[in-house]
Image (spheres, rainbow, N blue to C red):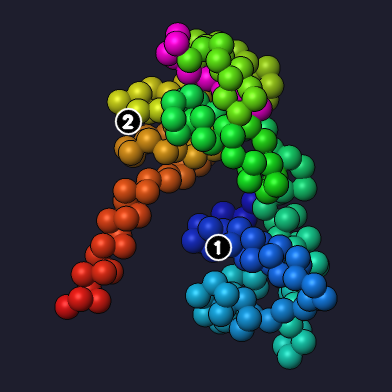
C-alpha cells in the first residue's frame, strides 16, 4: 500500500466505485466522464481526476472513462476481488440489524461470526448466525484469520473490546460505539456515529438560516 496517498483520497474511492456500479446497471451505458461523476457525487471534476491520477491513467481527455474498466481497477486498488470475512461484536438491536444487512456481501464483505458477552444473547441467532461467547472470540478469530471487525458495543465496553480484537490479530475496526478508540500504529479504525453526523448537519442548517 502506498502510504503517501492521502487518507481522504482513499475514502472517496468507494464512493466512485459505488456510483460507477450504479451506472453499469443503467441500460446501454458504457462510458462516463469526470463531469458526470462530479454531478452525481457533488465532487468537483478536477478532484475526481486528481484522485484517480494517484493510481495511474484511467481515461483520455475528451473520451472519458470506460465504466467496466474503471470498476475493475478500483476493485483491484481496494482489494475487493476476494470476499473479506468480518467479525461482528455486539448482538444488541444494532448488531442484529448489521448481521441481517445483505449490503455487506454485495460489496465484498461477509459477516461470518457474531460475538457477545451477554449470556442472554449467546446461543441465539443474529442474521442467521449463532451468537458466540465473547470469551472465545480471540481463539476463534485467530483460527479463522479474520482481520476485520465491526464493533457494536456500548461506549464503556468499546476500548476493552478493541484491545481484545487487536490482540487477536484484527487490523481494521469499524466502530459504531460513540467513543474514540486508542489503537496501536498500523491498526485502522473508522467510526460511524449518526449523532455526530446529525450534529454536523444542524450546523449547516443554522448557517443557512442566518
As displayed, is residue 151 above or below residue 196? Answer: above
- Residue 95, given in percent of the width and then of the height, sits at 49, 30
- Residue 10, given in percent of the width and then of the height, sits at 56, 58
Instruction: Give whichever of 21, 164 is nearer the camera.
Output: 21
- Residue 184, given in percent of the width and then of the height, sits at 44, 34
Q: Is residue 13 left or right of residue 150?
A: right
Check disc 1: other Cα within 10 Å, few if <14, some if 14-19, many if 20+.
some
Q: Is residue 71 left or right of residue 49?
A: right
As displayed, is residue 205 above or below residue 188? Answer: below
Q: Which quarter of the image is occupied by the C terminus?
A: bottom left
Task: Residue at 68%, 42% (x, y): give it.
Answer: 105
The region drawn magenta spans 112-120
Q: Is mark 2 on a helix, strand or loop?
A: helix
Q: Mark 2 points at which residue?
A: 155
Q: Mark 1 points at which residue?
A: 12
Quadrant housing residue 92: top left
Q: Earlier in the sequence, mark 2 or mark 1?
A: 1
Task: Residue at 54%, 72% (x, y): give it.
Answer: 41
Amino acid at each position: 500500500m502506498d502510504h503517501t496517498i492521502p487518507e481522504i483520497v482513499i475514502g472517496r474511492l468507494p464512493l466512485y466505485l459505488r456510483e460507477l456500479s450504479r451506472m453499469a446497471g443503467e441500460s446501454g451505458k458504457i462510458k462516463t466522464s469526470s463531469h458526470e461523476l462530479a454531478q452525481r457525487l457533488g465532487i468537483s471534476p478536477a478532484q475526481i481526476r486528481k484522485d484517480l491520477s494517484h493510481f495511474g491513467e484511467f481515461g483520455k481527455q475528451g473520451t472519458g472513462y470506460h465504466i467496466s474498466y474503471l470498476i475493475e481497477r478500483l476493485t483491484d486498488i481496494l482489494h475487493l476481488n476476494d470476499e473479506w470475512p468480518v467479525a461482528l461484536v455486539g448482538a444488541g438491536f444494532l448488531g442484529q440489524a448489521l448481521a441481517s444487512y445483505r449490503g455487506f456481501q454485495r460489496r465484498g464483505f461477509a459477516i461470518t461470526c457474531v460475538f457477545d458477552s451477554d449470556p442472554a444473547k449467546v446461543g441465539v441467532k443474529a442474521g442467521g448466525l449463532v451468537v458466540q461467547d465473547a470469551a472465545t472470540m480471540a481463539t476463534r478469530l485467530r483460527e479463522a484469520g479474520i482481520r476485520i471487525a465491526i464493533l457494536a458495543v456500548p461506549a464503556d465496553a468499546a476500548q476493552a473490546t478493541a484491545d481484545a480484537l487487536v490482540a487477536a490479530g484484527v487490523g481494521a475496526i469499524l466502530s459504531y460505539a460513540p467513543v474514540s478508540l486508542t489503537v496501536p500504529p498500523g491498526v485502522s479504525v473508522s467510526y460511524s456515529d449518526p449523532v455526530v453526523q446529525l450534529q454536523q448537519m444542524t450546523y449547516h442548517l443554522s448557517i443557512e438560516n442566518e
